[in-house]
Image (cartoon, grey):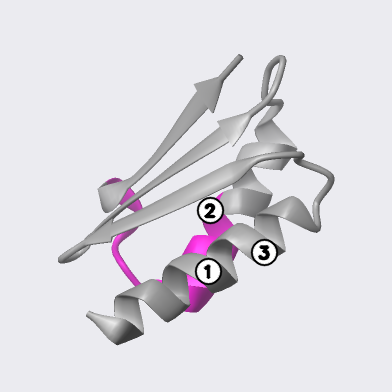
Amino acid sequence: MAVAIEKEAAIENQVKAKNFSECMAYIEGDKVTVSVKTDGLVSNEVSQIKDIILKETGVPVQNITIVEVK
């Protein structure tokens, strides 16, 4: 569990470094959900977030969910 918390924090910090004001990451088993405050994501931003998640967790791409929060 501590490892998941560390990975969540790492994902959140890296996504925020990409100029997103707010981000929450949730890891549950082999699934990752990231909520990002945005007015709309463009494809390269989605790719950047997925790359961060893959680097930190190694979960399959189909197990990644990115949620836009307005």
Q: In this view, does 8 lie above or below 63?
A: below
Q: Earlier in the sequence, mark 2 or mark 1?
A: 1
Query: For residue 41, which quarter of the picture?
Result: top right
**Front one among 57 and 24:** 24
Q: Earlier in the sequence, mark 2 or mark 3?
A: 3
**Which amino acid type is shown beneath numbered disc 3?**
Asn
C-alpha span from label 2 to label 1:
15 Å
Q: Residue at x 53, y 69 (%)?
A: 9
- Secondary structure beneath dot 3 equals helix
- Secondary structure beneath dot 2 equals helix
Q: Give the range drawn in magenta.
A: 50-62
Determine contact: label 3, label 1, CB under 8 Å: yes
Q: Which residue is drawn at 44% across and 53% down?
A: 25
Question: Is residue 1 found inside the magenta-colored segment of the image?
Answer: no
**Front one among 53 and 37:** 37
Q: Residues within 10 Å of mark 2 (few under 14, many from 20)?
A: many
Q: Is residue 44 above or below residue 31?
A: above
- Left or right of 55, for residue 32: left
User: On the image, numbered disc 1 is attached to which residue?
Assistant: 9
User: On the image, numbered disc 2 is attached to which residue?
Assistant: 50
Q: Which residue is drawn at 67% across and 64% down?
A: 13
Q: Which mark is residue 13?
A: 3
Residue 35 at x, y percent in the picture: 48, 37
Type of secondary structure dominating the magenta stretch: helix
Q: Residue at x 22, y 79 (%)?
A: 1
